[in-house]
Image: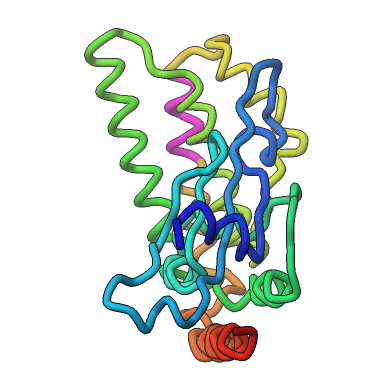
Amino acid sequence: MRPEDIVRDHTVYSCVMGSRAFGLATEGSDTDRRGVFLAPAPLFWRFEKPPEHVEGPGEEEFSWELERFCALALRANPNILECLHSPLVERVTDTGRELLALRGAFLSRRVHTTFIRYAVAQRRRLDADVRTTGVPRWKHAMHLLRLLESARDLLRTGELRIGVGESREALLAVKRGEVPWPEVESRMTRLAAEADTALDRTPLPDEPDRARVEDFLVRARRASVRER
């Protein structure tokens, strides 16, 4: 079975991500689609295993096999966790609804490490741009600020918020290059510090609920066998 056929026939959850999900879309923004597919269990019985992820078949489309997706979510991968909380769901099956019901099981204090580590890597790239060209990539600066706000609020409330809400215009001003770089730097530093402070009182558990997620994955695999 071709990878694109697996995605077409066995997707359990798909959504729109990127600027459209964050509430930052402008004219000409891409439509980034992300999905999760459950590869039929018999495909794992062969020497050649089904893919862990598939790019396509549509433009700006990327999907993960369910087990890989859950493993990344348990590690608090920012992109994966945000995918689970997209407000723009395009397709969801019964298995997909079970996955969405598990969103809280994936969240833990690990998000502080993963979100901030990702932010630090992006900040280094922005600083390198400034050293090289004198200006940052403003779109990337905007998304870094959004990520830091999201991490801070997640640690404060225990809930992952995707839409930027009232921050939209301030963030778009950064994207347009209307905010001086030193001010943007100051915002980044402040948001990172606020996330550090929030960690001390976060309602999030120390670890995700791995057993609950694993039980779900086993049920999904068994159901896949019965559907042969």
- Relative side of 204 to 68, left or right: right
Instruction: Decide: is 74 above or below 54.
Output: below
Residue 186 painted magenta: yes
Residue under the point 41% across and 51% down: 116
Count of numbered tags: 0
Q: Main secondary structure of the magenta part?
A: helix
Q: Position of residue 175 (x, y in %)?
A: 56, 18
In the rendered structure, which segment of residues is drawn in magenta? 182-190
- Relative side of 17 to 43, left or right: right
Residue 150 painted magenta: no
Camera-side residue of 131 and 62? 62
Residue 179 position by quadrant: top right
Q: How is the image coloured?
A: rainbow
Instruction: Decide: is 162 above or below 155.
Output: above
Quadrant including the C terminus: bottom right
Residue under the point 55% across and 73% down: 106
- Relative side of 128 to 38, left or right: left
Camera-side residue of 73 and 14? 14
- Relative side of 153 to 190, left or right: right
